[in-house]
Amino acid sequence: MIEIFLKTLPFFALIGLGYWAGYTRFFTAEATAYLTKFVFYFALSAMIFRFTSNLELSDVWDTNLVLGYLAGTIAVYLIATAVALLRRQSLEVSAVEAQCAVIGNVGFLGIPMLTLLLGEAAIGPVVMTVSVDLIVFSGLIVILITLSREGRLSVGAFRTVGLGLISNPMIVSVVAGLTWAALELPIPAPMNDFLTILGAAATPGALFAIGASLAGKSAERMQTALWLTFCKLGLHPLMVAVGVIWLFPVDSYTATVVISAAALPVAGNVYILAQHYGVAPQRVSTAILVSTIISIVTVSAVIAWFTAA
């Protein structure tokens, strides 16, 4: 585990550097927002397109992997929802807490870190994980919040989900990359160099942006945050492991990648959704902060455990 921890340490050190920049106001909230946009819309998209343009659909789509990941994730989602409802939280708050319990920072942290730690072959399972999270669970939270507030499902809710998907640069870059690969088009050398240079900015930019954004997070409702952190860093990888190892078995390498992805801390986009809808943004903020700090140790432990298995 020490060896894996030392390999992951530079990634978290970059997050720490970003946190320092945000905390000291060397990077303002506005600067962090623009850096995040650059990474999300340009650098990360270039990295994803470059990787996926060299893949086939079979490298990304694995029915057992999708079913195993979904089974484990839905199990944790239902547990978190049930606990929230037992605490007499509203449906919309329960939906936000469940989102914290299962949606990890796979885009900004997982793609750059896991492809470097586990090899470029990890991009297929990681992209699958991101796609399931975006298509299934990012849509589900919008539907549940709308149902909670309006008492019914409207066409507008499904339109919002659809527009969110087709305008998401990660989904667009995955589809574009796989389409390029399916057409068997060569990537011209200048284009490849452009994508390589731009994509190289994704790793440091994303990690720095994570840290800088954490500096603006406050710690409130600590008990709830600790419970959600336990769900995300403990229950989620455990249930996904059950899903991809026993219920819908996949090869050991693929299982290691997707379990490691499940072990990542709560994603920042959960806070964006919570803030947008005005549903429990402070508890989400605390869950992101706490889970990111604790994941410095737990992510290394999960990767070390399953790579040694």
Image (cartoon, grey):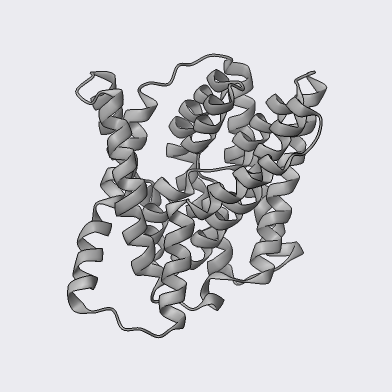
252 sits to left or right of 245: left
Q: Can residue 1 be spotted in the picture?
A: no
Relative image position of residue 85 (x, y in whole percent)? 80, 25
177 sits to left or right of 197: right
Q: Which quadrant of the figure has residue 81?
A: top right
Looking at the image, the residue that sits furthest to the front is 155
Relative image position of residue 44 (x, y in whole percent)? 35, 54
Q: Tell me: residue 257, above or below residue 104.
A: below
Q: Nearer the viewer, residue 84 or 278?
A: 278
Relative image position of residue 93 (x, y in whole percent)? 69, 25
**Quadrant occupied by the C terminus:** bottom right
Residue at 61% of width from left, 53% of height from top? 135
Residue at 39% of width from left, 27% of height from top? 214
Q: Which quadrant of the figure has residue 36?
A: top left
Looking at the image, the residue that sits furthest to the top is 220
Relative image position of residue 90 (x, y in whole percent)? 76, 22
Q: Tell me: residue 108, above or below residue 177.
A: above
Q: Can residue 66 be spotted in the picture?
A: yes
Q: Tell me: residue 220, above or below residue 192.
A: above
Q: Nearer the viewer, residue 27 or 33?
A: 33
Residue at 36% of width from left, 57% of height from top? 45
Q: How many marks can you see?
A: 0
Residue at 76% of width from left, 37% of height from top? 79
